[in-house]
Amino acid sequence: MTTSESLSTSAPPTPGAEHSGNKRWLILAVIAIAQVMVILDATVVNIALPSAQRDLGFSDDQRQWLITGYALSFGSLLLIGGRIADLFGRRITFLTGVAGFAVASAIGGAAGSFGMLVAARVGQGVFAALLAPAALSLLTTTFTDPAERGKAFGIFGAISGAGGAIGLLLGGVLTEYLDWRWCMFVNLIFAGIGFVGGLLLLGPSDAEERPRLDLIGVVTATAGMFALVYGLGNAASKSWGSVDTWGFLVAGGVLLIAFVYSQTKVAHPLLPLRILLHRNRGGSFLSIFVLCAGMFVIFLFLTYFMQQNLRFGPVESGVAFLPMIGTLMVGATMATTVLLPKIGPRLLVTVGMLLAGAGTGLLALLDETSTYSANVLPGLLVSGFGIGLTMASSMNVGIAGVDPHDSGAASAAINAVQQIGGSIGTALFSTVATNVVTSQLLSGKNPATAAIAGYSAAFTWSAVLFGVGAVICAFVLRPGVSAELSTAGPVVHM
């Protein structure tokens, strides 16, 4: 899911060699390949997790860090990634991101311990935060003609939107027929094409204006997000009363408050607060956060349910998620092309969240006798359609009408909210599931029954979160079609 506005706040580019002839479309191909690498890595590891867990011997409460490590480092550094592209140039930032991602992937594939694998996932997120903003900025500066730019972003968005499905399938094929480590090593192929292509095709790109880096904002935002997610993660292995849990949660809250305060005082804030104080935009950011917090849980726990309880292989597990991706794409397309311009975001987001909650609620009913077609598939279809309606509407509203000099910060913030929402949701619901499993085992339940009880608890609370999010967004978002949406075409493709 990507935004089709620039993540750069630099002045308009001067047309150069990189904008001439068919070279533009080759640049698009190179950038899209690199972007697919970033997108699919958010899902490719899900299918490989059971195999990696058996190989490296890490515990159930540790496995969440292979998801949150990537999403947290990616999301918390996206805002600074856009600034770095402005400071040092889009080309060098893109190439550095691709090369660094490849190195981190190679380390992950060769990992001999859980700690090494988590470190590699964090490294992937760090370099993805450089790569993603630079990629969108390069597209904006390469395609200066409005008609061509719309077509380019349409192609780029479609490819990026398919990245999640590609990750699920690719993860299954690589894990089943080669080894889970190839879910990491395969990135070297994507990165090699992206790096060589970028080196040959991209011309130098330097910003005319170099904004100062908001170091206070960088430190407080990154440290605050890390402390918050780390504290939630500790609740699974320790307890809510442990100082390692509440201490980090309090520290995270204080740091994030300091971040918000600092953004009102610096000349070049990472996230200008005027972006969030717009009523519809603030509501859209909230809905994206809630949606991703609940959505990542579906991928994580259903993967384990299908492989451990339904005895699906990795490939079969990947294919099993495709119906959800299909209804998600249908919902997203209907929202952006038909419904949003006519009825506005309030009804779409509210209904979409309620459907996502209903679908997740169906998954909470899974037990040891459940089958895929009768019990898993209905929940996937309903939740996928609801997620598509909500996500597409929210992301369009989140960028519509933003001042040109704020478009970079708004675009980066939307992507950051996605990743941070996923990180917090995964950590929180993993903690819920682990606590329930422990309680079930202590009461004498067998491991299979205890595991399903844990999944069910996570799905239940995820459904509750969707419901609460629907109610809040119904009050926050304005009714009807705003002026920004009536004059702007779709800016987000999924």
Image (cartoon, rainbow, N blue to C red):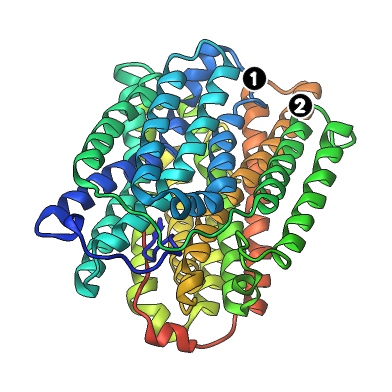
Element type at mark 1: loop
Determine which quarter of the picture holds residue 491: bottom left
Which residue is the site of mark 1? 59
- Badges 2 and 1: C-beta atoms under 8 Å apart? yes
State the residue at coordinates (72%, 36%): 230
Task: Name above or below for residue 394 compared with residue 478.
Answer: above
Question: What kind of residue is marked 2?
Answer: Ser
Looking at the rendered structure, the kind of residue marked 1 is Ser
User: Sequence-wise, which precedes: disc 2 or disc 1?
Assistant: 1
Q: Left or right: 29 with respect to 472?
A: left
Q: Is residue 53 left or right of residue 437?
A: left
Q: Is residue 453 at least partly visible in the picture?
A: yes
Task: Give the percent coordinates (x, y) of residue 312.
Answer: 40, 27
Looking at the image, which is closer to me, 199 or 387? Answer: 199
Viewer-closest of 271 and 361: 271
**Relative to 174, does residue 293 appear above or below in the rendering?**
below
- Quadrant of the frame with the C terminus: bottom left
Residue 422, x across and y down, in percent: 58, 47
Give the secondary structure at mark 2. Answer: helix
Which residue is painted at 21% across and 50% down in the image?
27
At x 43%, y 52%, the residue is: 133
Q: Relative to the observer, which residue lies in front, 362 or 38?
A: 38
Say whether residue 112 is left or right of residue 457: left
Residue at 78 percent across and 56 percent down: it is 258
User: Looking at the picture, how far across and down is residue 329, in whole percent?
Assistant: 35, 59
Q: CA distance from mark 2 to mark 1?
A: 10 Å
| Residue behind mark 2 | 237
How busy is the neighbourhood of tag 2: few (under 14 within 10 Å), some, or many (20 plus)?
some
Q: Tell me which corner region of the image, top left, top right, bottom left or bottom right, holds residue 96.
A: top left
Q: Position of residue 292 (x, y in %)?
A: 55, 53
